[in-house]
Amino acid sequence: MFDLDNTLYPHEADLFPQINDQISKYVQKIFDLGRDEAMVHQKALYHEYGTTLRGLMTTHSIDPDDYLAFVHDIDYSNLAPDPDLGTAIEALPGKKFIFTNGDRPHAERTAEALGISNHFEDIFDIVSAELIPKPNRETYEMFLARTGVAPARAAMFEDLAKNLSVPHHLGMRTTLIVPRGSREVLQENLDLEADPYPHVDFVTEDLAGFLKAVKGSLA
């Protein structure tokens, strides 16, 4: 299972900052706030409810379809086809899924821009999860029930460590995707602290390279 944003494409593609800006604009519109106030409120909702969407649905009964369409109205031109990633994903054994807190249209546009659409069995998005976001355990259980994936034979790739805790406890192998150039800094922190991320099995800043190495070890 592959998360989408900042996982299947690099952080420097700057897609997620656009989404974040759109979320802030939506919060501005709902609450009639200035930009700075809206960002503060947005982050508060995110930290309390897991996603801004869930927070807005809980506190203001917004239309989730309207929200998802608005926040994913972004420019994808920074994304370029990534044939190395496509080849690495295709070479992996088993079925591959995109598992995202975003919506299916956004995932489809992103995968299409990267040239990797054909390598996935399906997309499990926030709508498939009944608008319950990762890292809620219920979300992963819905994914497993829908796909028939056996956790002990599965792996999860994510850019947020907190979203790997449940997969780890379910028996999956977990890999944290970090921005390029940050792996050594993260490793220093791991060396200084008493294993702050016991639910993370591997860390990489090069997803395609990591997948090729995994495939090589299985050969």
Image (spheres, rainbow, N blue to C red):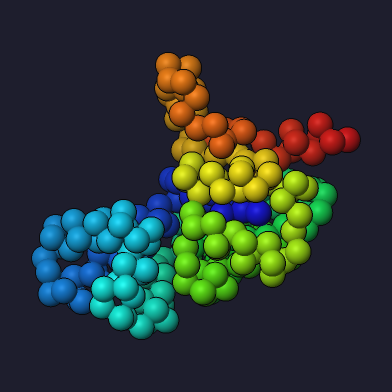
Residue name at image x 67 percent, y 41 percent = 173
Image coordinates of residue 67 in percent, x first then y, are: 36, 76
Residue 22: horizontal and vertical position, in percent? 31, 67
From what the image shows, is residue 16 above or below residue 112?
A: above
The spot of residue 152 in percent (x, y) is 75, 46
Q: Position of residue 157 (x, y in %)?
A: 60, 46
Q: Nearer the viewer, residue 168 or 75?
A: 168
Q: Is residue 79 visible?
A: no
User: How many circles with numbers are drawn on the protein?
Assistant: 0
Whether 185 is drawn above or below 157: the answer is: above
Residue 100 in the figure: left or right of residue 54: right
- 41, above or below 191, in the image: below
Q: Residue furthest top?
A: 192
Q: For this rendering, which residue is in front, 101 or 85? A: 101
- Farthest residue to the right: give it: 219
In the rendered image, the quadrant that contains the N terminus is bottom right
Q: Quadrant of residue 30?
A: bottom left
Relative depth, front residue between 150 and 124: 150
Q: Residue at x 43, y 20 (%)?
A: 193
In the image, what residue occupies the spot 20% across and 76% down? Answer: 29
If the image is split into quadrants, where does the C terminus sit? Answer: top right
Q: Residue at x 62, y 33 (%)?
A: 201
Q: In the drawing, does residue 42 fall left or right of residue 169?
A: left
Whether residue 49 is visible here, answered yes or no, is: yes
Location of residue 22 with respect to 179 vertically, above or below: below
